[in-house]
Every structure is written in C-alpha cells, then in structure tokens.
Amino acid sequence: MSNDDITLTAGDAEVVVRPGNGGRIGGLKVGGVELLRQGERFGCFPMVPWAGRIRDGRFRDGAAVRQMPLNAPPHAIHGTARDGEWRVARADATEAVLTHDLADPWPYRGRVTQVIGLTGDSLTLTMSVEAYDDSFPAQIGWHPWFNRILEGTPADIGFTPAWQEERGDDHLPTGNRITPLPGPWDDCFGMPDGVDVTLTWPGRLELRVASREQWVVVYDEQDEAVCVEPQTGPPNGLNTLPRLVTPLEPLEATTTWTWRRL
C-alpha cells in the first residue's frame, strides 16, 4: 500500500494518519474541532526506539557504547522513527496498521508496528518493537501536541503523580525522586498505577490520556500546546532503566485517549 495520508472516521471523530511523516497522527477532530497542533513537526509522533533525551547521545549495551546523532545538542532526542517513512500494512475506515524498519543510525535490525484504532469517543495507539537478530535496549512513547486553547478556552491539566523525577540543568533526571512541583513543566512523573492525565477545556471538552505504563512527561512551556507523553521509561532510560527487546520477546505499549463533551 502507498504511504499517503489516511483518514479514519468514527461518529463525529476524524483522525489523519501520516505514514510518510514519521508515522504521526497529523490531526484529531472531534465535532469538527481540531485537538492537535498543526504543522509538520506537531500532531502526535511516535518516540521509538527511545523516548526523550539520551545523555550525550550515548548508551551502553553490554560492553559496547553506542553513539546516536546529537539532534538536540548536547543530547539525542525522541528516537529515529519520527524522521523516517512508515509503510501501511492495512487500513480501513477506523483502523490503520503501520510498520517501520529500524535502520541506520540505530545499530540494530528490528521492526516497529503501530496500530491506530478510532471509535466515536476514543483513540487507541499500540506500538511494538521486535528484534530480528541481536537483542537491544529500547523504549516506546508518544508525543502528542494538544492545542492549549479550543474555541477560546484554555486547557486545565489534571493528574496526581506519585513523584516527579528531579530535573538537572541538562534537562535529564538526576536519579532523585521529589514531591511533584507546580508547573510549568518539561518534566517526567511517575504514576505506578498507570498513566492517567486529564485535559479539560471548561465548557468544551474533557480528554483523558491513559496507559498501563508508569511514566509520563508533561510539557506545557509553550503558549500554543500542551504535551502529555506516556512512555515505557524515563528520559535517558536506555542508560538508567533499559527494557530489553529480544527475538523472542518484543516490547509493547498502548495509550488510549478518551474524550467527552462538556
């Protein structure tokens, strides 16, 4: 199948999927109102095979030290898959399945599969990473840019994390867990019972971001957007909390966004 944009529809919800632009969700409209910030860099992109920053772009795999390009100097950020093309494995009116083969500069052979499923009141994103030959550490995450203002109404952010990862001057966790601080944030939080963050545009819409994963980065330092990023580990996690992908055991994660009118 081609990698042209795909439009999914269910009820009054519409999702645009962009396989040719990093496998991202290019738009999510509910009742004709766009919830995601528009632009080539925005929407919602997959973070894989790592999420957030890697310190100095380097991670250790056994005795080997791997160097990734410093696309956010002095660090590497957000994986490689958002910069590549994805292939459409199948698509119908409410679901699309995309695949992406991991390639240079990532030093291991593997495949990422993303399933995007839409209902009238929810969007579910599921991603898996498979290893072909050698095992390797990996992370999965999503980076949605939700519009801060809908129809003139700014969003409120509601969540109750168990802790906040203390952030160093280099924007990476120091390893200390602290009591959550008030925003604005570009910070990682721990939610051991699963990610559960609600964006509320009073009188307009409520949108809940949920995942079984225990880590979420919240970024609200921009006027235009709020980012709520479920992921399988903290920033720099390839070094501090690696999840091993083997030929027999892929890494899989899911997030579901559910909305209702207010």
Image (cartoon, rainbow, N blue to C red):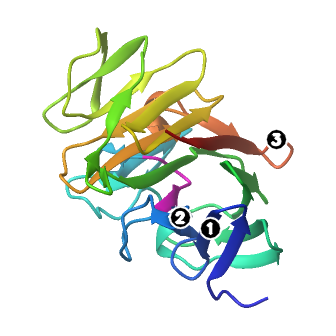
Circle 3: residue type:
Glu
Q: Which residue is located at x 71 percent, y 54 percent?
A: 120
* Residue found 86% across the figure and 44% down from its top: 248
Q: Nearer the viewer, residue 261 or 257?
A: 261
Q: Which residue in the structure is indicated by mark 1?
A: 14
Is residue 52 visible in the rendered image? The answer is yes
Q: Nearer the viewer's eye, disc 3 or disc 2?
A: 2
- Local crowd size for mark 3, using a 10 Å CA cut-off: few (<14), some (14–19), many (≥20): few
Q: Is residue 234 visible?
A: no
Looking at the image, is mark 1 or mark 3 nearer the viewer? Answer: 1
Q: Is residue 170 magenta?
A: no
Q: Which residue is mark 3?
A: 249
Dots 1 and 2: beta carbons under 8 Å? yes
Q: Quadrant of residue 132?
A: bottom right
**Spatial distance from mark 1 to mark 2, Cα to Cα?**
5 Å
Nearer-N-terminus badge (3/2): 2
- Magenta region, residue range: 44-51
The residue labelled by disc 2 is 29
Are the residues flagged by discs 1 and 3 in contact, CB closer than 8 Å?
no
Q: From the viewer's perspective, is 32 left or right of 187?
A: right
Q: Residue at x 72, y 51 (%)?
A: 128
Q: CA distance from mark 3 to mark 2?
A: 36 Å
